[in-house]
Image (spheres, helix red, strand yellow):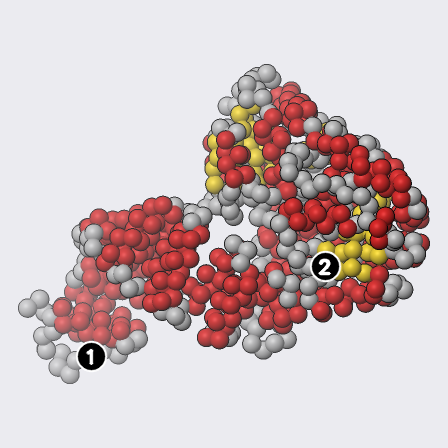
Amino acid sequence: MNAVAPRAHAALNRFGNFAFPDSSQQVSISQLLAHANRLHKAGQLPQAESAIRAILVEQPDHPQALLSLGIIARQSGNLAAAAELMERAAKIAPTYSQAFNNLGGVYLAMDRLEDAIAQYEQAVELRPDYAEALYNLGMTRRMFGDCDKALEALRACAKLTPTRPDMHFEIALCQQQLGNKMHAQIAYRVALDLDPDLIRARNGIGRLLGFMGRYDDAVNEFRQALSTAPNDPQVRNGLSESLRRIGQFKEALELVELNNPDVPRTIETLLNLGTVNQVMGNIDLAAGYYELILQLLPNADFAEKSILFVALNRPQLSSQELFDLHLRLRSRHDRPEAALKTFEGRSRDPNRKLKIGFVSSDLRSHVVALNVLPVIEGLDRDRFEIHLYAQEKATDHITQRFKAFATGYTSINRYNNAEAARVIEDDEIDILVVLAGRFDENRPLIVTHRAAPIQVSFHDCATSGLDAMDYWLTDAFLHPQDTVEQFTEELYRLPVYYQYPIQTGLPAVAPPPALTNGFITFGCFNKPEKLNEQVISLWAEVLHAVPDSKLFLKYFNHYSEDAMQRSWIEKFAAHGIDEDRLILKAKIDHRLDHLELYREIDIALDPFPFNGATTTFEALSMGVPVVTLLGRHFVDRVAASMVTHAGMPELIAADRGAYVDLARRLAADPARLAEMRRTMRDQVHASPLCGGPAYAETISTAFRDMWQTWVETGGYKGR
């Protein structure tokens, strides 16, 4: 009968709340286990545990009892005990598939993804029709970043349980991560057909549609989800983000305002509040929300990057304050132990072929990609080997161009910073270039693990603040010898910094609109967050200095909402500029339509301290002069560098008075504007700004100089 002995009866009483009326009563192990399972299902965990421990008193190696006790331990939050118990069960009964499946779940909860995958694989090997293990295997492989193999497991699960909505949701996530947007949509729809109230699927398809640029459709999905789950933070934030994308900032803010009792105080909510305020131009408010995230989540790298990004838009910060901010947020990530690496096994031949690595989230249709492509395509393959490490958000035809010129292409999405650094070090990269560190999803903290002998910051707009970042690429205009800017890197000045490939199919250059309008139109297509109070006051002076002139502002659809328009009208009204002198346009244009808008402005005004880079190049390419104020730091000398290299240094103003005077003199000379309009594009295209092969050679020289210094000193010139 396999009965529980009298000593087990005593154990039942000792372990609590479980006793038999007659201590001589014979109870089988199977009966006791069944009773324990009933108690477990009823949520009576202490009583269930007592029953199971009674079994283990009699049979210490009973695999089912060990597993059941492990499950209770996991539910009680004791993951270490759960793992130990389940490991014993699996070792005692190596064909017990449930033990392996549950152990995988514990490892997953412990963030041991590879170990979890191994357990799920064992469960499936033992029992190929084990649908739950197949689902868990697919989900965990997806979390690990191996979506191809994840789909194999999930599709096998689908054959066994085709009506399981969460399984179709997982398939959708895999397809989305693989870039198969249409298949992802179908899987989300199947999940929602099976369970219309599966909020995570509704949230998932809403975010996918937003990622595809179908923001109106995304709004509809999130509104439907909100009707079912009005307090779900992911739904509220998803709807807020989608509304922000279509320029409906008022409702976007209302959805996540902290004074609303229905709004959970989550990290995502704070991030959304920061982002909405940032794009509206409320920079100080945005910075406050990002700082609050850091108080709640001190290691939130995305919040640090957001603070460092908005700092570039704050003209009140002194050079010392800007540097101190970077040190406060970034120096805490420094790893002195990593700095001790000497790469002893690395050949120090100064003339050998070098391995160059680039880390970026922007290897796609992106402004950084436009600047870097001439380098990647132009580096001599006999002297350099190119390896790309992509934090992939999306891939496109530009990604394929990068891949075509690279020896290696590695997605680092699934790796943490230490793991990514190890991959890079294993590839024996000699010079690691981190692109646009504070922007998008870029990962400059990889360098703190000293992934390569030489580590370089490129296309960031201020210091990285990291001791492990050796060089910062710049030029003599961005950083003159007497620069007041402070930085942790060694500056390496290129002959020219910015580089753009010549675009084909550009719209024809039109005459200045003033010739037909009878008035001058100034314009700026930069982000509203760049238009701080100092910029507004200076531009108001320009408008006052040029009677009847107008100011044309546009940035995607940001000026579409009445509340947003009224806000900017009031900002200029405070400086005596009437509403009829502002032209506020809003539309998400295709690139050519966007460039066509430059036909409607005579003179572009550059903001500060965060100058326009791509917008400056676009304006010059369309024959529109850009008036820029020479600043103190890299970020407010960008346009000065560009117009100088384009051969038009006369567009640089040394101070506010010179800025107004320059704009006034240009406005008063329509013949000069017409001539600039006629010749400027060819001048720009013939300038060093568009000299791809020569630019690549200067980068080659920089890499060789850096390598020579490291070979000779083991560091860089400043060390």
Residue 585: mark in rendering:
2
* Residue at (78, 59) in percent of width and height: 583
Q: Earlier in the sequence, mark 1 or mark 2?
A: 1
Question: Secondary structure beneath disc 1?
Answer: loop
Residue 19: mark in rendering:
1
Q: Position of residue 351 (x, y in %)?
A: 59, 16
Q: Position of residue 342 (x, y in %)?
A: 56, 28
Look at label 1 and name its amino acid. Answer: Ala
Look at label 2 and name its amino acid. Answer: Lys
* Residue at (76, 56) in percent of width and height: 553
Is residue 176 visible in this depiction of the protein?
A: no
Quadrant in which residue 78 is drawn:
bottom left
Q: Residue furthest left?
A: 1
Q: Quadrant of the N terminus?
A: bottom left
Is 625 rendered above or below residue 491? Answer: below
Left or right placement of residue 108 versus residue 624 in this view: left
